[in-house]
Image (cartoon, rainbow, N blue to C red):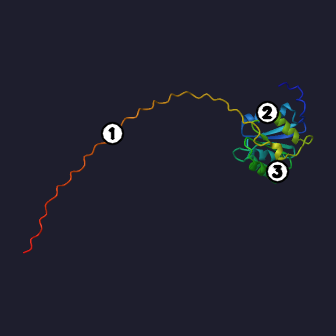
Amino acid sequence: MDKSAPPPVGFDLSSLHVLIVDDDPMARRMAVETCKRYGAGSYEVAANGVDAMLLLLTNHARINVIACDWMMPGATGLELLAQVREMGLDCPFLMVTGKADRGAVMMAKKAGVSDFLLKPFRPVDLAEKLFNLSPTGRTPISLSDLNIGSRPAAKPVPVSEPKIAAPPVPKPVPVSEPKIAAPPVPKPVPVSEPKIA
């Protein structure tokens, strides 16, 4: 990317100081590149909720929006959100998630989430969400805005696996029942009646 090129038209993120929290290095890198491309004022990066809390404890006055993955080891995005709100921080919190069922969305809204971004997403999707959460573009969300379940599922990336020939299936061997001779029937023994004298 040309460093001297102006950011794309439409989303001025210069007022934002973003905290990016994601355990996936590729997702973090894309979020950082999006912040750079769209001219975010600054950004901090954390690989998990615990690291994010440490950054918030030292830089909370500067950070004015958090973009956080939901499912992470250590502390989940929902746990981080609860801690942020317990600290009294009122900054917008963007929850990034690959699964957003209605119950989970309601739980996050109750905890104080500002908006959601469903995975997979494009950089422009992240820029738009961040812009909408910025002081110049802030808009409230409703459940109908989320369009849960309307986004097409990501196409799986084909992975070539080594071809291993299956072992030949053995042919069934006919099994005959063993012939067991019936036990001989004993001959009746003549019984004589006792003689009474």
Disc 3 and disc 2: Cα gap in Å?
25 Å
On the picture, is 163 further left or further right than 35? left
Q: What residue is pinned by disc 2? A: 122
Q: Nearer the viewer, residue 168 or 90?
A: 168
Q: What residue is pinned by disc 3? A: 112
Disc 1 and disc 2: Cα gap in Å?
67 Å
Q: Nearer the viewer, residue 157 or 33?
A: 157
| Percent of width and height locating residue 27 | 75, 36
- Mark 3 lies on a secondary structure that is loop
Q: What residue is pinned by disc 1? A: 176
Looking at the image, residue 101 lies above or below residue 125: below
For badge 2, the amino acid type reads Arg
| Percent of width and height locating residue 16 | 88, 39
Residues at marks 1 and 2 touching, judged by CB atoms closer than 8 Å: no
Residue sitting at x 85%, y 36%? 128
| Percent of width and height locating residue 70 | 74, 44
Between circles 1 and 3, the one closer to the viewer is: 1
N-terminal of the two: label 3 or label 2? 3
Between circles 1 and 2, the one closer to the viewer is: 1
For badge 1, the amino acid type reads Ser
| In the image, farthest residue toward the right | 136
